[in-house]
Amino acid sequence: MQSINRRKFIQTTTSLSIGFTLFGCLPKENDANRGSVFSSPSMPARDIPDRDQIDAWLQVLEDGRIQVLTGKMELGQGLTVVMQQVAGEELNIPPGDINIVLADTGLTQNEGYTAGSRGVERSAMQVRRAAAAAREVIKKLAAENWGLSPDQIKIENRKVKSLNGQKEISFADLLKDQQFSSAIPENIPLKAKEDYQWVGQAIPHPEMEKIVRGEALYVQDLRFPGMLHARVLKPLIYGAKLLSYPEEVAQMSGITKIVVNGSFLGVLAKEEYQALKALEALRKGASWEVENPTIEFSSAADFMLKNGNGEKISNSNKYTHNAVYAKPYTMHGSIGPSCAVAHFEEGLLHIWSSTQGVYPLRSSISDLTGLAEENIRISGIRGSGCYGHNGADDVAADAAILAMDFPGTPIRLQWQREDEHKWEPYGSAMRMELSANLSTQGKITAWDYQLWSDGHSTRPRGDAANLISSRYLEQPFEFKPRARVGGGTRNSEPYYDIPNPKIQDTYVSGPLRVSALRSLGAYANIFAIESFMEELAEKAGQNPLAFRINHSKDERSIAVLQKLSEVLRNVSLKEGEGIGYGFSRYKNTAAYCAVASLVSVDLSAQKVQPLKMWAVIDAGEVINSDGLINQTEGGMIQAASWTLKEEVKFKADEITSKDWLSYPILRYDAIPETEVFIIDRPELPPLGAGEAAQGPAGASIANAVYGACGQRVRELPIEKALVWL
Amino acid sequence: MQSIRFSINGASFKTEVDPGTPLLYILRNHFHLNGPKYGCGLGQCGACMILIDNKATLSCMVNLEGIEGKTITTLAGLSAKSGKLHPVQQAFIEEQAAQCGYCTNGMIISAVSLLKDNSSPSEAEIRQALQINLCRCGTQSRVIKAVKKASKI
C-alpha cells in the first residue's frame, strides 16, 4: 500500500487520521473486519470443492468464525446480508458475525451470473443447506468427543457447547483446524421456521457503516503498490476506425505508455490526472474513419414495425380494442463509471472486477487473450450498482488488454462518464401491439399480443466479441448477435385468466448495442399489458383493480391486489391529480407485485410530479424484510425515472446522450414518497424480488398520468410524449 | 511551482503538485480518502462532494489552486475522533438509506452542509439541497427520511 506521498504533500501539523483501511488482509489477521463482507485481493486461490460439498460454501476461520463463500455478487441488492441470515440461522450464529466472500474464480463455486433475481432462490438456499449440514457435522463431532449424543450439543455464542454447559469448544478447535470435508446430505434437516431468530427480520446491511464512513469497499477504491492509472480513448462511434493519433502524447508528463492495438487506444500514467490530460490530448488529435454510420430514427415503434423480420398479422377487423405501445432504448446509468484493476505477471492474469459473472467473464477473457482459463483469475468486488449488463465486463477486458501490454504492474482503469453513457449496452427498444375483445359482462374474451424487440442479452459467455473492445483490435473479433428476442418475451404472457391468449414476438436488429437491463422485456411488456388492462377496465366501466381481480385466478395475485385496494381506501385526489395501478407476477413464476402511483400533471407548467407510490409485494418466504422493502422502493423510483424521462438519443454518427444533462434521470424534486407492504409467506419458498416492481411501477405511472390529465401515453418516455399546453 | 496550503480532516498540508489537478484525484489517490467518488467529472451527479469551509462542494470541479488556505472535510472526517458517527451518518444507517452506496457520500455531504445552515429544514429545502445528487438505485425516499431524522437529533 502506498502511504501519503510525503514528497508531494508535506504535513504541517500532526495527528492526521485518514480514513483508509488496509484492503486485502485475511480476516483472521484483522479483527476490525469482523463480520465484514469482503473481497480479498490477497486471499490465495484454492482447489474449489464440488457444489455438493459443505466446504464449497462454508469455511471455519482460524479465529473460529464462519465464512460463507458465494458464487454470486453483491450489487447493492442486499444478497450478502441474506447469506449471513440464512447461514447464521442454521448455525445459531448472529448474522453479523459471518464473513462473506463474493464470487471469485479462485475461491468460489461457478454460479454463472448474478442476475434474473435468482440469487436468493438458488445460491442462498444452497448456503442454507450447507450451513445446516455443517451444524450437523459439528454436533456429531462434539458428541463423539464428549461421549454424548448429537442432540445434547448446542451452538451458542459462537461456541460449541454441551446442553448442560459444562463442555465448550470453538469451531476451529473442534475441527482441529481442518475444514468440513463431507457432502451436504440430500435431505438435510433445516431449522424449524418457528424457531427463527433472524430470518425474516430487518437485519441491517453489514456494509452500511463502511459506506457512510467512506471506507474502501469498491473496485474503484483498490490500490496496489506501483499501480498505474489508465484511460482508454473510445472510438467516435460504433465501427469507427482509428486512422492516426498524436504520438507526442507519450512525451507528456507522467505518461508511462500509450497502448495501441488496431483501433484500441489506451494510456498508462503514474497519476490519474496525467492519464486524463493525455486522454484529452489523444481525443483532440486522433482522427477516425466512420465506416458504417448507424441508423437514425425518431420513433422506436415505427422503426420496429418496419424493420422486424416477421410479418405483422393484421387483427384490426377481429378485435374491438387495439393499442400500440413502445419503449425507447434506455440506459443502465450506473452512477460510478465502470472500473477494473488488472495485473499480468509470469503468464498469470488477475482481474478485480464488479462483473455480475466472474466465470463467464473469465472464459471470455480467455478467448480474448488466448490465455488458458486456469491462468486467469477474476475476483469479484463491489462496484457501483449495475442494474444488469453495463460496462463492468468491458472495462475488465480493456484493463486486461492494457495489463498484458505492460506486464508486472497493476493497471487501474476507470471509464469516463462519456464512455459509460455511449458504450454501455442499452436496454432494448420494444414495440407492443395489443388487441382484445370484451364481453358485455366486461370479461376479456380474446387477446392478441404482438411484440417487436431487439435482443436482451449480449453478456460475455465465452465469446470475446461480446467484450466491446475486442471488435476494435488489430485482429478484431466478429460480433454475431443471437438474432432473437430472448428475454424480450419475459412477462409477455398475461398473468390473467384470459381464454387462449395469442402471443407472437418478432426480432428486430436495431442500431444500438443492447444487452440485459434490469427485468429485460418484463418492464415494457408489463407497461403495455397493464396500460391496456386499465384501458379495457375503463371500456368495461369497471374499477381498474376490480377488473384485474375479476381476471385473476391465482389467490396470491388477488391478495396483493386486494391489499393495495385496502391501502388506498382513504386516498382522495385533488385537481390535476391521478392515480394508476400496475400488477404482475415477475416472470410469471417469481414475486407478485401490485403498485399504485399518485401523480399530478400540470400541462401549462410542463410538469409531471410523482407524489406517492405504494407497492404490495408477495415474495414468498421473506428473508430480510427491510431488504425486500428497499429493493421494491428502489425498483419503483428507478422505473418512474425510466417511464417519465429516459430515452437514449443518437444521430447517424454520434450517440448524443453522453452525460446526465443529455440523458436526464429523476432528481430529488421529482422523487415520490414510497410505501411498501409485504405479504409474508414463511411456509413457501422465497422468490426473487429485485426486479418485481419495475413493470407494475412503470404502468402505474402512465395510468396515473392518464387519470390526471386525460392523455394516454403509449410511447415512452411520458415527458416527451405528453402534449403540453 | 507555487506551494499551496490547506487542511484536510483536521490536519494541515502544503503541496507543490500540479495546481490544476482536480481535488477529487488528490483526495482519492494521495490521501486514500474513499468517500468522494468519481461519477461524472462534470459537476452533474454529486458523487464527489466534500465540504470546503463547511459548504458542500463538487471536488471534481475544484482544483488545488482553488483551495489555498481552505478547510476540507471529507466523509471520513465527519465522525468524531472517538469514531462516533455524525448524526447524518447515523441516520443513514438507521434508515438503511443506500443500496449500492456509490452515491451516498454526496448525499451525506449535501445533508451535513444543509443542516449546518438550517437545523430544521422543510422537506422542500431538503430536496432542494440534494437536487445535485443523483442516485440510480432509487433510495432517495429513504435518504429524505434519513435527513429529516438527522435534523431532529
Image: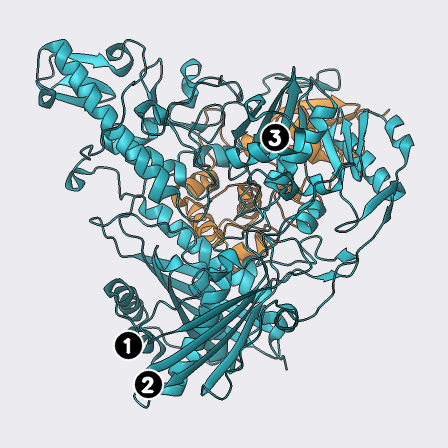
Chain colours: A cyan, B orange
The answer to whether marks 2 and 1 mark residues whose Cβ atoms lie closer than 8 Å is: yes
| Label 3 CA crowd tier, 10 Å (few <14, some 14–19, many 20+) | many
The residue that appears at 23% across and 65% down in the rendered structure is: A555
Give the residue type at disc 2. Answer: Gly
For the residues labelled 2 and 1, the Cα–Cα distance comes to: 9 Å
The residue that appears at 64% across and 60% down in the rendered structure is: A509
Circle nearer the N terminus (1, 3): 3
The residue tagged 2 is A442
B133 sits to left or right of A296: left
Query: Is residue B27 in sight in this rendering?
Result: no
Residue A646: x percent and y percent? 60, 62
Where disc 3 sits, the SS reads: helix
The residue that appears at 90% across and 36% down in the rendered structure is: A246
Residue A366 tag number: 3
The residue that appears at 89% across and 26% down in the rendered structure is: A251
Q: Chain of mark 2?
A: A
Numbered label tally: 3
**Please, is residue A272 above or below residue A312 in the view?**
above
The residue tagged 1 is A550
Circle nearer the N terminus (2, 1): 2
Residue A13: x percent and y percent? 65, 18
